[in-house]
Image (spheres, grey):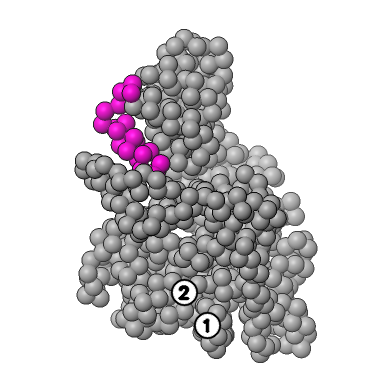
């Protein structure tokens, strides 16, 4: 669907003719939510009122009921009803989950007559295997081997649904020794050694030993590499040696650096492999803030220097206080890298350290007006005010009205209000697919009016229009934030900044680690915090309530601040990466916070800390408060305090 702002406005009179909302919109919304809840709780349905039947998202209720029925009593009549529904809603978001679950049900019931013609374009791994099984079961074997081998070669745990077709491949002699070896090597290259050992069972014995050795190098790099260092004539594949040593350099960097000379002395080690080992050791030492990192980088040949090395060798030099070396290495960066605010700032810092503040002042001035972490640091160096470059987005009420009358946007709004956020995002995305920048800006403003702040911020970011600071920094859940601020003795802006970075204010957010809610707390951590602070235990689902989650997250941040002597940067790093990691990163002696932050080895955590500091500044700006200065927020980072 492609829209421009002009086209949408031209269509506005037609779009405005959409059926009006029910007289009691909240009542029908509550009826819808109650009906969905009955489905989730496996309670009997009740008849839908006429208002609910005409509700904009009633189709989602119909689809949810059929998805439930597929697990209870699938039959021909249900299949026919679902098929008709999918035909009537081709390409619409409401059909996606239903289609996927229906196809899975058809496959489970081996209704290949229904399944095959409707599964041509599947991309789900399980459904791909179901389709292969369907073709095998119906003797449709023309080209089946090629299609099955494509799936078999994927270096992932194969779905159980592929077992029969893989057995057929084996019986037909398609699983050759070379293919089995290639599959195992792909798993090793993907750093999945246990899966590789499973795959190696299909590799002939005379080719299996080298692959199992590679697996050992990934699984137990310390012991496996120590054997190779002790026995320099023991054969090993170069790629296996390099990948095992790279793993060791990331997990035990100091040991890897100590072991490196013995490995470099191995018989017949090619120069390119030597360079790979040296590069891994140098990067590992830099991640670990080992003082030997600079020397390791200095010994790298030019062929081993890539952008990762170029950045981390400067960080290692800055950590060690060797600003002359840092400046030399920054000068060797390609313009695409050295021109970024990060390295322009560190170039200025290096010039200040080696040539004096007067020489550095023009360099700091070049970035001091930027609205980002490095721009603020540069402004602090010059004692200049921050420039947030605030420019509100143009408001086009007619465009927003026309947009809000789009059927898909009506559904998105109602789904959001019913806490069906993922479905709402699907509808929103379908409406704005191919939209121009002007229309997306109006959409962002519309989402903000609805209180859908995550979508407002995300949509505006897609346009590259970042100057509407007020739109990008809303203040939702303010009652919970105010309560949390009093409880934990924290500025509200700090809590909002963490919330924005953690979840973008989505109360239903769930991470891969099962962190939940706006403050992204793991249930076990949240329960422990609740006990320590004498708050009600949130359980698992309680974290989806901001009134519960925000005080708990603020309390956790307060605990971290107390633990690390009010050091904001370290506490934020601990909130993101965990106290164990942050504690390991503490310097041996007091250090400037900007140096410490730059050397956080996790890219995600480094960016997390920097962005939250940017957010704190922005939240103060949108409420016209005095701008907090990073040089005040960021005291020197102190070493770990020895236990009493």
Q: CA distance from mark 2 to mark 1?
A: 10 Å
What residue is rendered at 43% in x and 54% in y?
21
> Looking at the image, how many numbered discs can be counted on the residues?
2
Is residue 44 among the parts visible in the rendering? yes
Helix, strand or loop for disc 1:
loop
Q: Nearer the viewer, residue 459 or 443?
A: 443
On the image, the x and y values in percent for residue 167 come to 42, 17
Q: Main secondary structure of the magenta part?
A: helix
What residue is rendered at 50% in x and 80% in y?
637
62 falls in the magenta region: yes
Q: Nearer the viewer, residue 513 or 486?
A: 486
What residue is rendered at 40% in x and 54% in y?
22
10 Å neighbourhood of mark 1: few (<14), some, or many (≥20)? few
Q: Are marks 2 and 1 in contact (CB under 8 Å)?
A: yes
Q: Is residue 137 left or right of residue 464?
A: left
Q: Reading the chain from its start, which is encountered first: label 2 or label 1? A: 2
On the image, the x and y values in percent for residue 299 come to 69, 59
Q: Is residue 310 above or below residue 190?
A: below
Displayed quadrant of residue 511: bottom left
On the image, the x and y values in percent for residue 580 come to 39, 66
Q: In the drawing, what numbered circle is on residue 71?
A: none
Q: Which residue is mark 2?
A: 475
Q: Is residue 441 above or below residue 202?
A: below
Is residue 278 among the parts visible in the rendering? no
Q: Is residue 146 above or below residue 188?
A: above
Q: In the drawing, what numbered circle is on residue 623?
A: 1
Helix, strand or loop for disc 2:
loop
On the image, the x and y values in percent for residue 638 come to 47, 81
The magenta stretch is 58-77
Q: Nearer the viewer, residue 359 or 264?
A: 359
What residue is rendered at 33% in x and 50% in y?
32
95 falls in the magenta region: no
């Amino acid at each position: 669907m492609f829209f421009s702002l002009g086209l949408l406005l031209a269509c506005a009179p037609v779009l405005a003719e959409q059926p009006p909302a029910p007289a009691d919109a909240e009542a029908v919304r509550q009826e819808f939510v109650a009906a969905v809840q009955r489905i989730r709780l496996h309670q009997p349905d009740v008849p839908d009122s006429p208002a609910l039947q005409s509700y904009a998202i009633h189709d989602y209720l119909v689809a949810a009921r059929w998805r439930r029925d597929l697990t209870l009593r699938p039959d021909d009549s249900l299949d026919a009803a679902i098929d008709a529904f999918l035909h009537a809603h081709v390409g619409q978001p409401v059909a996606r989950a239903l289609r996927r679950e229906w196809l899975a049900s058809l496959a489970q019931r081996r209704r290949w007559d229904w399944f095959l013609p409707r599964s041509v374009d599947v991309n789900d791994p399980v459904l791909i295997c179901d389709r292969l099984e369907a073709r095998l079961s119906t003797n449709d074997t023309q080209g089946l081997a090629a299609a099955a081998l494509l799936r078999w070669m994927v270096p992932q745990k194969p779905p159980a649904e592929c077992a029969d077709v893989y057995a057929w491949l084996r019986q037909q002699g398609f699983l050759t020794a070379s293919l089995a070896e290639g599959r195992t090597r792909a798993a090793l290259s993907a750093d999945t050694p246990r899966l590789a050992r499973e795959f190696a069972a299909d590799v002939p014995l005379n080719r299996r030993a080298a692959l199992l050795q590679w697996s050992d190098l990934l699984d137990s790099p310390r012991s496996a590499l120590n054997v190779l260092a002790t026995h320099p004539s023991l054969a090993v594949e170069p790629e296996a040696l390099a990948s095992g040593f790279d793993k060791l350099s990331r997990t035990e960097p100091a040991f890897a650096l100590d072991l490196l000379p013995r490995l470099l002395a191995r018989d017949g080690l090619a120069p390119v492999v030597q360079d790979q080992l040296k590069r891994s050791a140098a990067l590992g030492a830099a991640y670990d803030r080992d003082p030997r990192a600079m020397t390791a980088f200095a010994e790298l040949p030019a062929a081993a220097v890539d952008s990762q090395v170029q950045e981390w060798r400067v960080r290692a030099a800055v950590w060690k206080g060797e600003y002359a070396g840092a400046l030399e290495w920054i000068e060797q960066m390609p313009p695409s890298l050295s021109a970024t605010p990060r390295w322009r700032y560190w170039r200025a810092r290096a010039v200040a350290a080696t040539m004096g503040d007067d020489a550095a002042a023009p360099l700091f001035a070049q970035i001091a007006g930027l609205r980002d972490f490095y721009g603020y640091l540069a402004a602090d160096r010059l004692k200049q005010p921050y420039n947030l470059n605030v420019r509100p987005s143009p408001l086009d009420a007619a465009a927003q009205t026309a947009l809000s009358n789009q059927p898909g946007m009506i559904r998105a709004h109602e789904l959001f209000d019913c806490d069906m956020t993922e479905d709402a995002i699907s509808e929103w995305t379908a409406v704005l697919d191919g939209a121009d920048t002007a229309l997306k800006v109006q959409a962002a403003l519309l989402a903000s009016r609805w209180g859908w702040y995550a979508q407002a911020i995300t949509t505006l970011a897609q346009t590259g229009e970042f100057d509407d600071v007020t739109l990008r920094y809303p203040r939702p859940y303010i009652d919970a934030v105010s309560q949390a601020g009093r409880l934990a003795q924290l500025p509200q802006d700090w809590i909002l900044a963490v919330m924005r970075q953690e979840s973008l204010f989505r109360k239903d957010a769930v991470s891969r680690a099962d962190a939940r809610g706006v403050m992204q707390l793991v249930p076990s951590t949240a329960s422990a915090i609740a006990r320590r602070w004498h708050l009600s235990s949130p359980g698992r689902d309680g974290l989806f309530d901001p009134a519960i989650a925000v005080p708990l997250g603020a309390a956790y941040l307060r605990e971290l601040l107390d633990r690390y002597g009010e050091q904001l940067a370290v506490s934020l790093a601990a909130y993101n990466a965990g106290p164990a990691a942050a504690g390991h990163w503490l310097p041996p002696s007091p250090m400037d916070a900007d140096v410490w932050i730059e050397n956080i080895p996790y890219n995600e955590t480094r960016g997390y800390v920097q962005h939250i500091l940017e957010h704190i500044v922005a939240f103060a700006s949108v409420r016209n408060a005095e701008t907090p200065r990073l040089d005040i927020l960021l005291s020197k980072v102190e070493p770990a305090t020895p236990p009493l």
